[in-house]
Image (tube, rainbow, N blue to C red):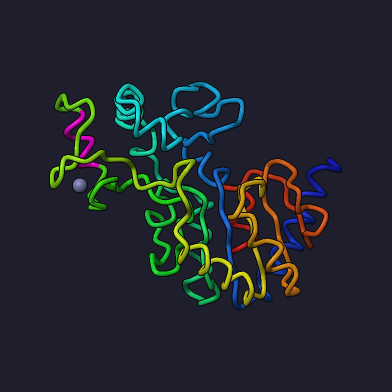
Amino acid sequence: MEHQHDLRASVERAAALVARATRVVVLTGAGISTDSGIADFRGPNGLWTKNPEAEKASHLSHYVNDPDVRRSSWRTRASSPIWQAEPNPGHQALVGLERPTDRLHLLVTQNVDGLHHAAGSDPGRIVEIHGNARTVVCLECGERAPMARALERVRAGEEDPPCRSCGGILKSATISFGQSLVVEDLLRAERAAATCDLLLAVGTSLGVYPAAGVVPIAVDRGAPLVIVNGEPTPFDPVADVVVRGSISEVLPAIVG
Ligand code: ZN
């Protein structure tokens, strides 16, 4: 089939570019985790499409000002598929950029699911630009604690567990709407993009800024751009290769 031939050819061209690179920056988005059973937010089966209340909870002002939003949010967290999710061959393939060869410069992820850590990527080279759902943070005193402990309290009957140190509101340590990104994380991603010799964008629509902003930074410095995504992105016209296939199937072939 023509389509399959195109796919194989694009995978081969992407693999050749990756094989030549020694300082790779990877940007990942929701698409790399869908094969681990984690729905994206806005797709047809997305978390927010099916549960608009959850989108409301992702806005900081609603979360802080409305106890109902927080209670609903804790119920959603307690039953989230994310806690059972395992890394898939896409996450695992990216570990191959670090071992046996040492070619990964930085892994920037828009995901909050922690699956790159679970796959075994070096935590020192992961930037979770939108935070991490496996940690809670107190909005008053800033104390951080494992999400698992807060969820135990929810399952034991606390509908909106407060901070144990100060009584403040607890929230997952993700970046909500109305919250700024962590400046150091963003700068680290941008510096890495400016000095990489390949940018590999995987499973991201490249429509959410400032995360997507690393792409023009790398491209302007002359780094090749490889995009692996199920859907078209605004940066496809400037990419050296666009691979449109199942990420858990094609990424091992590209990075392997
Ligand atoms: Zn506190």
Tell me where residue 3 sits by quadrant. top right
Q: Main secondary structure of the magenta part?
A: helix
**Residue found at x 44% / y 27%:** 54
Q: Residue at x 48, y 29 (%)?
A: 55
State the extent of the magenta-drawn residues as a range: 148-154
User: Which image quarter holds the N terminus?
Assistant: top right
Rendered image quadrant of residue 123: bottom left
Residue 101 in the figure: left or right of residue 235: left
Whether residue 38 sits left or right of residue 73 in the image: it is: right
Is the C terminus in the top left, top right, bottom left or bottom right quadrant? Answer: bottom right
Give the x, y percent position of residue 129: 48, 55
Q: Residue at x 19, y 37 (%)?
A: 162
- Residue 43 is situated, as x and y percent measured from the top left of the image, at 60, 31
Up-down relation of residue 130 to residue 216 (above or below): above
Q: Position of residue 205 (x, y in %)?
A: 66, 45
Along the viewing direction, whichever of 141 and 219 lies nearer the viewer: 141
Does 6 lie within the magenta span?
no
Q: For this view, does 54 lie left or right of residue 194?
A: left
Please say if 243 is above or below 58.
Answer: below
Which quarter of the figure has residue 125? bottom left
Residue 183 in picture, x, y percent from top left: 47, 62
Residue 142, above or below 20: above
